[in-house]
Image (spheres, grey):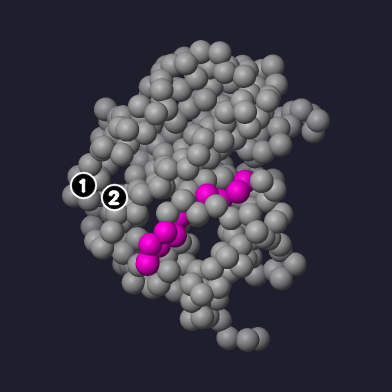
């Protein structure tokens, strides 16, 4: 499926209040640039013009973000009330998310918790990137936890790689990419945090995919599981040779796991780790919530 076609939109969940789409890799969610085409917002407006909200700038409220290069499950709220209920779930860490990735090298531990605080990188030439605590130029690092489970070992274009399931227990910018890089197992195709390779050696995409999403709002349980894109039938460069953990079994665990308790820490379904209790909401966080809800409000003509 080519990303530059407005017709190419895959919907994996739909209700009166929410859509979950399987976002294509190398696709922007939205853009203020009229030349930017396509975007996910334009695809949604093309397929669902009747669902576009005229009181918003983009027509749709995206409940969370995915990087331009990341594919997979992305939830869209179809009204302001639904957006507010989804935001509450994210704020209280009651959302369950799991990603698939191909990472460089063979990860030795089959299961692990990655625990590196992440902050913004102030180093010259590294603007808009993140780094782990202790790195030169790392500003305001915050606690960050990711669960990793190895699924398969194999080769990608002849180089050793591991296929892993990643579950972020916090929501820092570029968290999964930074954590994998900190382990010296960067995501295949990650040009920002990965290994420097010749241009001709670069894969056609970054191998990170939002695989599973569950948002337990007070009115409905939004749940979606997207197709696995990292299979040899879709990419002949990927050649697995050792199965470590069945993805189907992990999906069953994810689906059966209770929703995280907002009054407690939020370990992943396959985790033995826990997070400390979340502190009360601050005024800054409350302001951030209001800004989030109004982010796609209609802007006056200039």
Question: 129 above or below 148?
Answer: below
**Residue 28 position in % (x across, y down):** 62, 56
Q: Quadrant of residue 197?
A: top right
Outermost residue on the bottom side: it is: 301
Q: Which residue position holds label 2?
A: 94
Determine the CA span between mark 1 and mark 2: 7 Å
Rendering coords of residue 174 (x, y %): 52, 44
Q: What residue does disc 1 label?
A: 261
Residue 4 in picture, x, y percent from top left: 71, 54
Q: Check the picture and name the quadrant holding the C terminus.
A: bottom right
Q: Residue at 42%, 59% (x, y): give it.
A: 14
How many residues crowd mark 1 within 10 Å: few (<14), some (14–19), many (20+)? few
Q: Earlier in the sequence, mark 1 or mark 2?
A: 2
Residue 66 lies, in percent from the top left, at: 53, 51
Mark 1 element type: loop
Instruction: State yes or no: residue 178 in magenta.
Output: no
Pick the front one: 48 or 169:
48
Question: Where is 151 relative to 66, above or below?
Answer: above
Answer whether residue 113 is visible to the viewer in this image.
no
Magenta span includes 20: yes
Secondary structure found at label 2: loop
Q: Is residue 47 visible?
A: yes
Q: Nearer the viewer, residue 291 or 30?
A: 30
Label 2 Cα crowd, 10 Å radius (few <14 / some 14-19 / many 20+): many
> What is the number of the mark on residue 81?
none
- Quadrant in which residue 35 is drawn: bottom right
Q: Residue at x 28, y 59 (%)?
A: 220
Asked if labels 2 and 1 touch by Cβ distance under 8 angstroms, the answer is: yes
Please state the extent of the stretch shown in magenta in the rendering. 14-25
């Amino acid at each position: 499926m080519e990303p530059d076609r407005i017709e190419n939109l895959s919907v994996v969940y739909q209700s009166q209040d929410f859509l979950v789409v399987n976002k294509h890799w190398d696709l922007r969610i939205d853009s203020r640039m009229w030349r930017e085409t396509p975007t996910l917002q334009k695809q949604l407006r093309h397929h669902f013009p009747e669902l576009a909200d005229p009181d918003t700038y983009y027509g749709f409220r995206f409940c969370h973000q995915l990087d331009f290069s990341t594919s997979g499950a992305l939830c869209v709220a179809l009204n302001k009330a639904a957006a507010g209920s989804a935001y509450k779930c994210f704020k209280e860490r009651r959302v369950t998310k799991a990603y698939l990735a191909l990472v460089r090298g063979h990860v030795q531990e089959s299961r692990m918790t990655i625990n590196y605080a992440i902050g913004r990188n102030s180093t010259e030439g590294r603007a808009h990137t993140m780094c782990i605590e202790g790195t030169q130029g790392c500003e305001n690092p915050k606690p960050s936890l990711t669960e990793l489970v190895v699924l398969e070992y194999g080769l990608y274009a002849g180089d050793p790689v591991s296929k892993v399931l990643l579950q972020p227990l916090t929501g820092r910018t570029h968290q999964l990419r930074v954590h994998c890089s900190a382990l010296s197992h960067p995501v295949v195709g990650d040009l920002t945090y990965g290994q420097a390779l010749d241009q001709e050696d670069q894969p056609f995409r970054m191998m990170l995919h939002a695989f599973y999403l569950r948002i337990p709002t007070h009115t409905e349980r939004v749940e979606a599981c997207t197709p696995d894109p990292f299979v040899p039938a879709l990419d002949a460069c990927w050649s697995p040779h050792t199965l470590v953990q069945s993805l189907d079994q992990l999906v069953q665990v994810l689906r059966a796991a209770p929703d995280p308790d907002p009054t407690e820490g939020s370990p992943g379904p396959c985790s033995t780790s826990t997070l400390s209790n979340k502190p009360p909401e601050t005024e800054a966080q409350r302001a951030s919530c209001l800004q989030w809800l109004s982010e796609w409000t209609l802007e006056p003509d200039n």
